[in-house]
């Protein structure tokens, strides 16, 4: 069964998500999964659902492929529930397996089972509807917003900790409420979270004022290398030597692609950085005024995400990949009559 909500009317949404709510409440034991390198929305949705599950007497585990829970979100509750397990066994018929913010099952753990009791709650446009029960809305600001819709549909018990987790996911996935995915419904939900005790100023500080000196040193290297192509593309890169010399971590790159987008007239940004396993991680960002989006380019490289924020994993040298991307973006720009772009 698949629910794909495109109507932003809260009453219609409440009717649609009751089946999801009922399925969650039916099972006494949950295992929650988030994607690799969990961001604010993944961590926020997981910790919010853990909190809601505790209030409803559920037995809960949180599983991910990363060794540790996301360090950038140390202020969130229930991080102690996190367990690292890449080769998970879906062998309990009495367990509900819940995937949060995962566009496909491969973004999380291995050995996914099509026969297990699975729910997929996600807002990525390219979600492949892999679970038995799918609640997918490509227009939603975040998975956290979708969870709040579920909670509101049948008046779940909520508290301030849950509200702060949900606020974190919505804040980060809307760029602090500045992205086009932030709808009137999103703001209504934020209002409900504030009523539950969220202090926007305090949460804004926790979410944004948490960069390490090592991370700032890493950012300075990427920012010093920015290359502007055709006046609307910004590209930069980080290699393993940068990580070693600054002592920064992969998590320190979070937010850096959006910084490239803050340059005047830039419509599309690319950040490349090397991983320890000789892979190159590419983060793409785009905005309105360009006829192709981040998601389209990411999918050309086997990646995915949203039309305005997406990523892919590539192999090769940073230098060669940069040249390839420069040529690709410039060609698409000129083939699409780039002079008509809105600057």
Image (cartoon, rainbow, N blue to C red):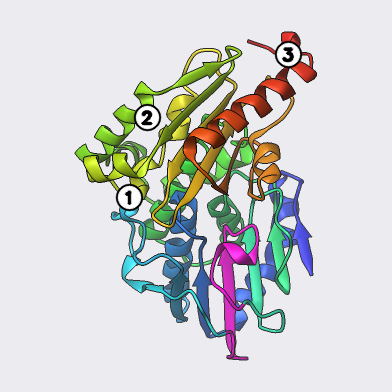
Q: Position of residue 310 (x, y in %)?
A: 59, 42
Q: Which residue lies under the disc numbered 3?
A: 338
Q: Which residue lies under the disc numbered 2?
A: 222
Whichever of callouts 3 and 1 sits on the residue coming sooner in the sequence is 1
Which residue is nearer to you in this view: 57 or 40? 40
| Residues marked 2 and 3 touching at CB (< 8 Å) | no
Q: Which residue lies under the disc numbered 1?
A: 72
Quadrant (top left/top right/bottom left/bottom right) for the C terminus: top right
Which quadrant would residue 186 be assigned to in this image?
top right
User: What whole-number distance in Å separates the C-alpha atoms at marks 3 and 1?
Assistant: 38 Å
Which residue is nearer to you in this view: 119 or 235? 235
Whichever of callouts 1 and 2 sits on the residue coming sooner in the sequence is 1
116 left or right of 67 in image: right
Magenta part of the chain: 90-111
Name the residue located 65 percent from the left edge and 71 percent from the top edge: 119
Report helix, strand or loop for mark 3. Answer: helix
Residue 103's place in the image compared with 327, above or below, is below
Whichever of callouts 2 and 3 sits on the residue coming sooner in the sequence is 2
Name the residue located 34 percent from the left edge and 65 percent from the top edge: 68
Label drawn at residue 270: none
Name the residue located 54 percent from the left edge and 35 percent from the top edge: 320
Instruction: Tell me if residue 226 is in the magenta stretch.
Output: no
| Residues marked 1 and 2 touching at CB (< 8 Å) | no
Q: Position of residue 265 (x, y in %)?
A: 55, 13
Report helix, strand or loop for mark 1. Answer: helix
Which residue is nearer to you in this view: 156 or 295? 295
Q: Position of residue 152 (x, y in %)?
A: 58, 58
Q: Residues within 10 Å of mark 1 (few under 14, many from 20)?
A: many
Say whether residue 139 is visible: no
Q: Residues within 10 Å of mark 3 (few under 14, many from 20)?
A: some
């Amino acid at each position: 069964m698949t629910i794909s909500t495109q109507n932003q009317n809260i009453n219609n949404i409440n009717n649609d998500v009751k089946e999801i709510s009922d399925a969650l409440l039916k099972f006494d034991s949950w295992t929650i999964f988030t994607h690799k390198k969990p961001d604010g929305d993944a961590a926020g949705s997981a910790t919010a659902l853990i909190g809601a599950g505790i209030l409803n007497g559920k037995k809960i585990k949180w599983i991910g492929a990363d060794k540790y829970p996301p360090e950038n979100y140390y202020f969130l509750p229930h991080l102690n529930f996190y367990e690292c397990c890449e080769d998970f066994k879906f062998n309990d018929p009495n367990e509900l397996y819940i995937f949060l913010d995962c566009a496909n099952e491969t973004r999380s753990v291995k050995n996914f089972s099509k026969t297990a009791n699975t729910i997929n709650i996600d807002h990525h446009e390219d979600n492949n509807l892999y679970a038995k029960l799918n609640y997918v809305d490509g227009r939603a600001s975040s998975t956290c917003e979708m969870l709040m819709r579920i909670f509101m549909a049948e008046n779940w018990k909520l508290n301030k900790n849950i509200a702060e987790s949900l606020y974190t996911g919505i804040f980060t996935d809307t760029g602090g409420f500045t992205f086009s995915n932030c709808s009137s419904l999103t703001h209504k939900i934020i209002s409900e979270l504030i009523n539950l005790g969220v202090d926007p100023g305090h949460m804004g500080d926790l979410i944004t004022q948490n960069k390490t000196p090592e991370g700032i040193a890493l950012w300075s290297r990427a920012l010093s290398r920015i290359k502007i192509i055709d006046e609307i593309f910004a590209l930069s890169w980080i290699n393993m030597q940068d990580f070693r010399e600054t002592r920064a971590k992969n998590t320190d790159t979070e937010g850096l692609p959006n910084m490239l987008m803050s340059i005047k007239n830039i419509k599309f940004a690319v950040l490349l950085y090397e991983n320890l396993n000789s892979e190159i991680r590419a983060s793409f960002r785009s905005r309105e005024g360009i006829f192709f989006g981040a998601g389209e380019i990411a999918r050309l490289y086997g990646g995915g995400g949203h039309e305005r924020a997406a990523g892919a994993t590539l192999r090769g040298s940073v230098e060669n990949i940069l040249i390839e991307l420069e040529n690709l973006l410039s060609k698409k720009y000129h083939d699409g009559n780039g002079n008509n772009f809105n600057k």
